Image (cartoon, helix red, strand yellow):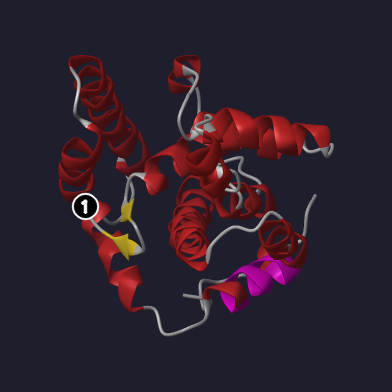
């Protein structure tokens, strides 16, 4: 498994701009928070280090894709798979192309990162409604893109219901993490180091 340091080194090596790294850090924070709470309240079978790594690297090929006109999710998937990390590669691909069969079983790392990516607009944690309003304005220029965004929005609400069903808090709780005073990297490092004994103090 890649360490937090490894993830940041890869982001730097691939020339990922600071604003995309900041976006990815917010996605990773939300993923970590939800993963920890799902493990605590439901004994969910989630790998926290995998969740953090997948979230941090989900847009590793975003900037390259903008420059070359390629698909960043597929490029990122192929890149991490070529490095020998198929589980991280799967999360990267799934944040855009989620396998709907996963909805039939327990919550997965892929679903969490898919959802949390839709809760971060640029570098700000927002609700799904605000995120998709922005996506519709920026990318909904053709009928086909509008249909795709509509599908993604509906799927995001389905996953939101799956994640929060039975949790002791609702989706709005994630907005409070925008005011987290700790450095994101320090939070990730702490959870990698001693996840098994975490009692929630990290947040």
| Left or right of 149 on screen, residue 26 | right
Q: Measured along the vertical axis of the image, is residue 6 above or below residue 112?
A: below
Corner quadrant of residue 16: bottom right
x 70%, y 30%: residue: 78
Exactly how many numbered labels are in the figure?
A: 1
Q: Measured along the vertical axis of the image, is residue 156 above or below residue 17?
A: above
Q: Which residue is mark 1?
A: 127
x 32%, y 44%: residue: 164
Q: Measured along the vertical axis of the image, is residue 86 above or below residue 38?
A: above
| Left or right of 136 on screen, residue 27 | right
Q: Position of residue 141 (x, y in %)?
A: 19, 28
Front-lying residue, 175 or 170: 175
Front-lying residue, 109 or 63: 63
| Callout 1 crowding tier (Cα within 10 Å): few <14, some 14–19, many ≥20 | some
Q: Is residue 39 visible?
A: yes
- Residue at the extreme bottom: 181
Q: Position of residue 122 (x, y in %)?
A: 34, 57
Corner quadrant of residue 166: top left
Q: Measured along the vertical axis of the image, is residue 196 above or below residue 151?
A: below
| Left or right of 44 on screen, residue 144 | left
The residue segment tinted magenta is: 186-194
Q: Secondary structure at mark 1?
A: loop
- Is 25 included in the stretch rendered in magenta? no
Q: Tell me the chief SS of the magenta region.
A: helix
Front-lying residue, 19 or 156: 19
Q: Position of residue 7 (x, y in %)?
A: 70, 58
Q: Position of residue 174 (x, y in %)?
A: 31, 61
x 43%, y 21%: residue: 103
- Residue at the extreme right: 84
């Amino acid at each position: 498994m890649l360490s937090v340091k490894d993830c940041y080194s890869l982001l730097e090596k691939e020339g990922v701009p600071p604003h995309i790294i900041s976006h990815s850090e917010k996605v990773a924070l939300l993923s970590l928070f939800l993963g920890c709470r799902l493990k605590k309240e439901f004994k969910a079978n989630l790998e926290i280090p995998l969740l953090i790594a997948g979230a941090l690297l989900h847009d590793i090929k975003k900037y390259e894709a903008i420059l070359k006109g390629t698909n960043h999710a597929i490029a990122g998937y192929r890149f991490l798979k070529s490095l020998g990390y198929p589980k991280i590669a799967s999360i990267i691909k799934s944040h855009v192309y989620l396998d709907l069969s996963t909805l039939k079983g327990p919550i997965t790392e892929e679903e969490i990162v898919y959802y949390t990516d839709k809760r971060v607009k640029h570098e700000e944690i927002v609700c799904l409604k605000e995120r998709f309003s922005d996506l519709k304005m920026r990318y909904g220029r053709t009928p086909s893109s509008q249909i795709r965004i509509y599908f993604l929005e509906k799927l995001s609400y389905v996953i939101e219901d799956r994640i929060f069903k039975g949790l002791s808090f609702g989706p709005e709780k994630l907005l409070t993490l925008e005011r987290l005073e700790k450095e994101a990297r320090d939070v990730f490092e702490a959870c990698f180091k001693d996840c098994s004994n975490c009692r929630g103090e990290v947040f």
